[in-house]
Amino acid sequence: MVATPLGNLADITLRALDILRFVDAVACEDTRHARRFLDHHGIRAATFALHEHNEQEATAKLIDLLGQGKAVALISDAGTPAISDPGARAVAVVQAAGFQVIPLPGPNAMATALSASGITDPHFLFVGFLPSKPQARRAEIERLKDIDAALVFYEAPHRISETVADLAALLEADRQLVVARELTKLFEQIVRLPLAEAPGWLAGDSNRQRGEFVLIVSASAQRSDLGGEAERVLRLLLAELPELPTKQAAKLAAEITGAAKNELYQRALAIKSDAR
Ligand code: SAM
């Protein structure tokens, strides 16, 4: 399983290039797309298509090659295969047939976006693509609302406006949205803004609706492992005494409420970061 670039062709590991040069064949989502990438790196391996519409037959071919003692790499059009991309079923079948599957780490849009998101929540849930039909999409967002974690979505340009509108309408207004667009490409853009302001921001310039998107919604500040009283006192101290060092605010809130000082400190950092 070989991860390939999200856009910038230089984002490929030395190990991935070695393996792609070494293997007898490359199973790929789109052979023409793969050929351009392989040619760019001077890799001559034979390719065959393995995509969501032929995964079963293509996997049978893959197993046949492995049975002949050949080595096969699996790549998708961009990023890590089997993550919102074909490959997961092939892996399961290949493993069940007794062959080893070796993952090569590399580009992934979710991890790339998260790393520069400034979202400080300790947990995140990778959702991937939401359903395309409005009713199913809204039901899914409602279901995700109660999860105490940041939410990570993939979205395409033709649905970005409706998805952001639904997120803003259905999730708490105090949550932040990170729009990570065209990562690693010429028009890369990463912005963090209050969720309620996101539909207006997107509509403000049609270029902002172009390209490929990762959306990250911060966890709800209202939902925290701290008791309601501890959260209330901490927020009050931070709001009323902005000059008070964060550590001091956490210590005071701990003394007043009996909640754990360290948890209050982590929470204070998250509240301060969300407010920026
Ligand atoms: N397997 C890929 C990965 O590891 O991230 C994801 C493939 S999925 C079919 C394609 C989606 O990933 C796009 O619609 C977009 O949401 C996200 N994506 C891929 N490349 C991106 C980029 N350069 N910038 C932002 N999002 C990207």
Image (cartoon, helix red, strand yellow):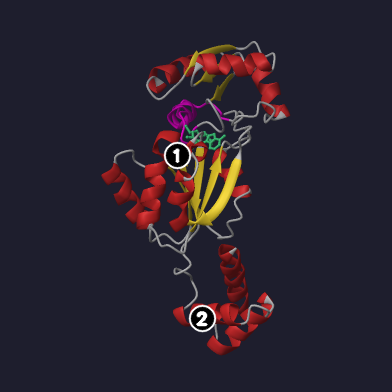
Residue linked to disc 2: 230
Which numbered tag is attached to residue 92?
A: none
Whether the residue carrying mark 1 lies under 8 Å from ligand 1 is answered with yes
Residue 184 location, quadrant: top right
| Near-viewer residue (100 or 177) | 177
Residue 41 location, quadrant: top right
Image quarter (top left, top right, bottom left or bottom right) of the N terminus? top right
Where is residue 60? Give x, y as percent: 43, 17
Please tell me which residue is depicted at 58% across the width and 14% down the height of the picture: 35
Query: Which residues make up the magenta segment?
Result: 82-101
| Near-viewer residue (100 or 192) | 192
| Near-viewer residue (168 or 131) | 168
Please tell me which residue is depicted at 39% across the width and 17% down the height of the picture: 57
Residue linked to disc 1: 155
Please tell me which residue is depicted at 45% across the width and 27% down the height of the picture: 90
Q: Disc 2 residue type?
A: Ala
Q: How crowded is mark 1: few (under 14 residues within 10 Å), some or many (20 or more)?
A: many
Local secondary structure at mark 1: strand
Where is residue 20? Give x, y as percent: 65, 20
Asked whether 99 falls inside the magenta stretch, the response is yes
Asked whether 112 falls inside the magenta stretch, the response is no
Where is residue 201? Give x, y as percent: 49, 49
Please tell me which residue is depicted at 26% across the width and 45% down the height of the picture: 135
Where is residue 104? Give x, y as percent: 63, 32
